[in-house]
Amino acid sequence: MGKYPTEPLKCWKKAKELRNRFYQNYALAGEKGGLRWMGSAWAFDAVPSGLGDDVFCISGESYGAACAFDRPLSKKFLEAARNFGFSRDLCAHMRNYWGSLLADESAFGGKFVKPDFGWSQHICCSHAKWYQNAAQMKGEVPIFVVDVGVGAYPPFEPKMYPHRIKYVADQLLDGIEWLKTTTGREFDDERFINAAWNDLRSTHKWAQICMLNRAKPAPLDEKSLYSFYVFGTLQKSNSEFADFYDELYDEVKDRVDRGIAAVHNERFRVMSDIGSPWGFSDIYRHMAEQGVVSIGSLYTFGLEGMWLYDAQTHDLLPRPLPDSKPRTREECCTLLADWHLSKPMYQNFYHPDNKTKMMDAIARRWDTDGIVLHYNRGCRGLCMGIAETRLGLIERGHRVVAYEGNMGDENEFDQAATRKRMDIFMEGLGCKIN
């Protein structure tokens, strides 16, 4: 069995420092006269940046995941949400988030700091209600939500009609006026345009980083991708995060050039579809011991990375950056609307075949030997049509294994049973399980 050289990533320390400073800035913003806002990881976070350099956010999904990572704390938060009356079949990240508010306890210590306003978007059935309830829990925090449910992006629909893009862009323009009225601040178009350009830079560069995992051996495994994709979920328009992705790309490219592997004994390659339970990380390590590397997923690639699906070549490729920055507020809102409506994970909400095509493209172009599907009870939106996707991938000739779980509620994940299922799957690939 061939072995490849491996080494730790040099940028791990900087990644931790950036993430910690991001949360510290939010916690301390009020003491320095700054503004805090809450909203979805998919919010157009470049827009509030026009209010000033002292405006900080906390995204619900990444915060909910941070809660879920601390299992005893997550149990406390989930019980608080359930006791309040929220159903267990709702989004698990949302329930962790709500439980944190109800307990008035932050996952990072201290109390949950009240935001000045809410700024989000709505495509999943949970998004707008997530922050409506959160706003009420914290004392009627004003919120603005942008509706992006306008239909699939080409080629999944033949044409993205201009009025659909305008519908979203006009909401962003209305939102700017709302932000000015709500905060009492002026809005700086130059700050906004620069932040929007950072958004495009980071989401484009993340896709380029994921492209590097086409190499054999894969320079990154899925566990590493989870650690780095989070910057896009925290704040895509953050200049430090966009610059960090440039550094990360250079380091991963160097690993490819030198043949540095994420899994030193890589023999087989698999991919997954959406976020896995925290307990699944042990199974990733078990897979690696058998020489199986997970090169990523549609989720890690496309939650915040920007791609375009080529219907002619059946390939998934990074969406090219525009030739230049927008010049006006109106141009910037139109560009942001069009850019984000092409997000791969949005397409899943319109038809399961869209997800099937993109996963088939990754499986073939990243040269995988099998696909792992998560029937995720904690995220109904990204699981819509998963049974149809499974059949579609099998029909296209892929080996597929599925397991049930919940990305943010460990009570709904049977790790022992899932490991047995994965062992059988890996034996089918040709592994001799240790």
Image (cartoon, rainbow, N blue to C red):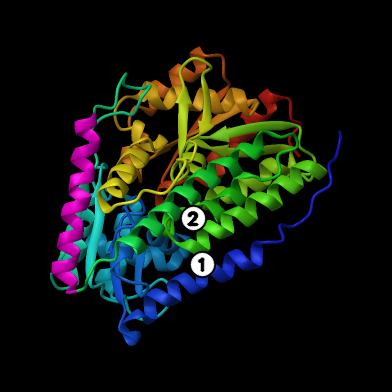
The reply to whether dot 2 and dot 1 touch (C-beta < 8 Å) is yes
Q: Which residue is mark 1?
A: 19
Split into 4 quadrants, where in the image is the N terminus? top right
Name the residue located 71 percent from the left edge and 57 percent from the top edge: 9
- 430 above or below 36? above
Reply yes or no: does residue 206 show up in magenta. Answer: no
Check the image and name the residue furthest to the right.
2
Task: From the viewer's perspective, tell me whether residue 213 is left or right of residue 175.
Answer: right
Magenta residues (range): 162-184
Reply yes or no: does residue 183 show up in magenta. Answer: yes
The rendered magenta stretch, by its main secondary structure, is classed as: helix
- 10 above or below 375? below
Residue 92 seen from this side: yes
- Residue 417 on image: x %, y %: 53, 40
- Inspect the image, locate mark 1, and give the three-letter code of the amino acid beneath it: Arg
Q: Which residue is mark 2?
A: 230
In three-dimensional space, the C-alpha distance between marks 2 and 1, rounded to whole angstroms, equals 9 Å
Determine whether the residue tagged by mark 2 lies in a helix, strand or loop: helix
| Total residue callouts | 2
